[in-house]
Amino acid sequence: MQTALTELLGCRYPVILAPMFLVSNAKMCIAALKAGISPCLPAHNYRTDEEFRKAIQEIKSAASGPLGINLITNKSNLYYESQLKTCVELKVDYIITSLGSPEKVIRACKPAGIKVICDVIDEQYAKKVELMGADALIAVNNLAGGHAGKLPPEVLIPLLLKNCKLPVISAGGVGNHAQMKAIMDMGACGVSVGSPYIATVEAPVNHEYKQALVDYGEEDIVMTTKISGTPCAVINTPYVQKIGTKQNWLERVLNNNKRLKKWAKVLTFYKGMKALEKAAFGATYQTVWCAGKSIEHVHSIRTIEQVTKELMGE
């Protein structure tokens, strides 16, 4: 299947293995490349530049194909500058920017021939990044796992296509071939898929997390502000039901205080990420698992190649 995405990146299928906090690693990226799709590795999954560089080099030496890196481009990412420098030095194929302005990334990547794709949730921001020189848009819709958008894909995709000239890649709500075809029929040139790939042999998370994606469905996905302070899609496990999905009164007061909200958000984010890490890798009753509504179509733990073939209808 040839689309604007396969032409832009040079991959066989118009599918990006979405960058997933804690989940995405070198092993998954290598398997994705061998399956004919393009993986995007989150730089924030690595604590040191040495580990980050090692992962990129490992992937490049084990498989050929377009490798992307996801960069958090706001002030919360203390390693932003060094991560960007590493991406340029190691000549990754593209960068997906999230949660901040991509201007600095675009300036650094254009001379190096690195493509820049930007997460967007509305047409206003899409117009801004287009003017900055972005190469494509990731349309994050309200069905996505983790930090989702506000609009459904059937509204967001046509809105972006009407207001921008850049290729649009849809993120959220794709778990099988029928859903992928529906998204492509709306005008998207490809999809960014995350949740179905968590329930794979190659994913580094524990078996309980993978099995949860098999056992739970679309109706079990809820939005919580307790993870990072902004709405985040998670599975509604008994533990999530117990702690609730809204911040308590103290957290709300701190997040609305002009002097304290920056540090309150940092603390909330840190606590939330630690909770996700424990649930993903350790034996714990504190099960907070990120996932999107596409888990409705996850019926078994498979390989990355098998998930890809199902998406492509093969």
Image: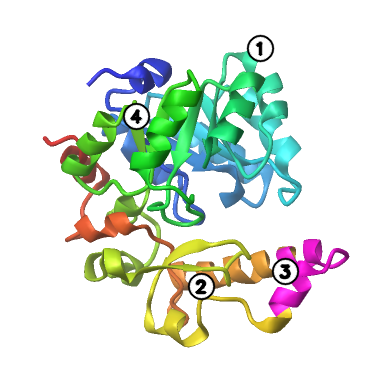
Q: Sequence-wise, which precedes: disc 4 or disc 1?
A: 1
Of residues 289 and 44, the one drawn nearer to the viewer in this rendering: 289
Kindly report the distance in space between the C-alpha atoms of the residues bearing marks 4 and 1.
27 Å
Q: Nearer the viewer, mark 3 or mark 1?
A: 3
* Disc 4 target residue: 188
Residue 169 visible, this orientation: no
Q: At x 23% / y 71%, what residue is drawn?
A: 215
Q: What is the quadrant of the C terminus in the image?
A: top left
129 lies above or below 53 = above
Q: Sequence-wise, which precedes: disc 3 or disc 1?
A: 1
* Disc 3 target residue: 267
Kindly report the distance in space between the C-alpha atoms of the residues bearing marks 3 and 2.
17 Å
Q: Nearer the viewer, mark 4 or mark 1?
A: 4
Kindly report the distance in space between the C-alpha atoms of the residues bearing marks 3 and 1.
37 Å
Q: Nearer the viewer, mark 1 or mark 2?
A: 1
Q: Sequence-wise, which precedes: disc 3 or disc 4?
A: 4
Kindly report the distance in space between the C-alpha atoms of the residues bearing marks 2 and 4.
36 Å
Q: Residues within 10 Å of mark 4 (few under 14, many from 20)?
A: many
Q: Sequence-wise, which precedes: disc 1 or disc 2?
A: 1
195 lies above or below 248 = above
The spot of residue 241 in percent (x, y) is 43, 83
Q: What is the quadrant of the N terminus in the image?
A: top left
The spot of residue 71 in percent (x, y) is 61, 39
Kindly report the distance in space between the C-alpha atoms of the residues bearing marks 3 and 4.
37 Å
